[in-house]
Amino acid sequence: MRAALVAIALASPAAAAPCGGDFAAFLTTMQDEAMAAGQPADTVKAFFKAAAPDPKVLKADRNQGVFRKTFLDFSQSLISKQRLATAQTKSADLDAIFTRAEAEFGVSRGILLAFWAFETDFGQVQGDFNTRNALLTLAHDCRRPEMFQPQVLAALELYRLNEFDLATTGAWAGEIGMVQMLPKDILERGVDGDGDGLVTLKTSVEDALLSGARMLQHHGWRAREPWLTEITLPDGFDWAKTGLDTTLPVQDWAALGVAARIGALPSGLPASVLLPQGRNGPAFLVYPNYRVLFEWNKSFIYVTTAAYFATRIEGASAYAAGTPDAALSLEQMMALQEKLAALGHEVGKIDGILGAGTRAAVQKEQSRLGQPADGWPTVALLDAL
């Protein structure tokens, strides 16, 4: 029944309302779109009443500087002994919920605990942006209207189902609840884990964790498979083989001298060698489940840190930090991106963030210039370009 309601609620075309321009006119168009999708007029009127744009949302959207941190800086700022201990205590205290998540959706408790910790500090800090206004602000903005206008309609349907209050608060990008899910994901994949007839991710631990597990399963999470293993690499390793663009069976990596730093590598899985800070920093082998995590968050640094923390929660040792080359400054990174773009590489926005496109371009230029092609930008590369 819920699936049928979802289909009706989201039946209208995405981004039907023109972005930008007068906000009041935009709201009128969104209301017309909602009623065309079958929503009752009184529900629509109540949902949109007194809605207002939030300039703080746009400021947050334009300034995501936290992802300019290196992997070591970011992971060490998010992972403390106390947070690790809290996660392990939660794992024991809520064992029945995590056992259910593993049994029904195949998702490891470490992953759920890592995202729960990072997103809201285990539900304690869920955000103070008005969710309706945040979604409408981003739906009206012309940067990503095709993403956020359907989220507005999903929030409207949750409101009709009594699962969304107009005073609901959350993250600046409209995510709600303990594991910070967008309304459309809640509507399509929310789980009534506590059996009260409602899906409420802000107040129900069971609903939040099981909904998160179901979302990851939907995006392709593979039950009983690992996601990341810390590794060591042999002298003379071909750094050009590292990065997410190169995938080989684990046994092929082992034949090249790749080994688990502690314990043994899994068998029978495709994998990639990941060097978050180049050949002199930590090294990991990552598997298909690691890639699924990008459906939760698009940031390479965030996902890699969450994946690593999940292994720590489940008993892995702390990584060997190594001695990576110093990171480029913001100005140097932006200059590097400009040079890479001028050479024809797809690096995306010139923002100083070492994303997937910039890493791939760095590695290609390192190979071309005869430098160690580990994907980590250095002053030597910047100078050579």
Image (cartoon, rainbow, N blue to C red):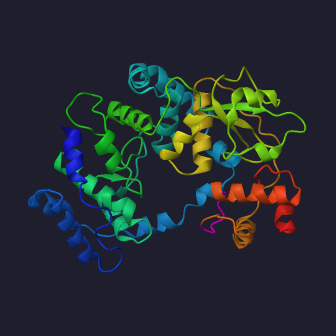
Relative to 79, does residue 110 appear above or below in the rendering? above
Left or right for 359, reference 292:
right
Left or right for 263, reference 105:
right
Q: Is residue 350 magenta?
A: yes
Left or right for 163, reference 245:
left
Q: Magenta region's main secondary structure?
A: loop
Question: Is any atom of residue 121 visible in this view?
Answer: yes
Q: Is residue 57 magenta?
A: no
**Magenta region:** 349-355
Residue 98 pos. (x, y %): 43, 24
Question: Is any atom of residue 167 visible in this view?
Answer: no
Q: Nearer the viewer, residue 311 or 33?
A: 33
Q: Residue at x 59, y 32 (%)?
A: 227
Q: Residue at x 32, y 56 (%)?
A: 151
Residue 65 pos. (x, y %): 59, 61
Q: Residue at x 81, y 45 (%)?
A: 239
Quarter-wise, where is residue 313 in the image? top right
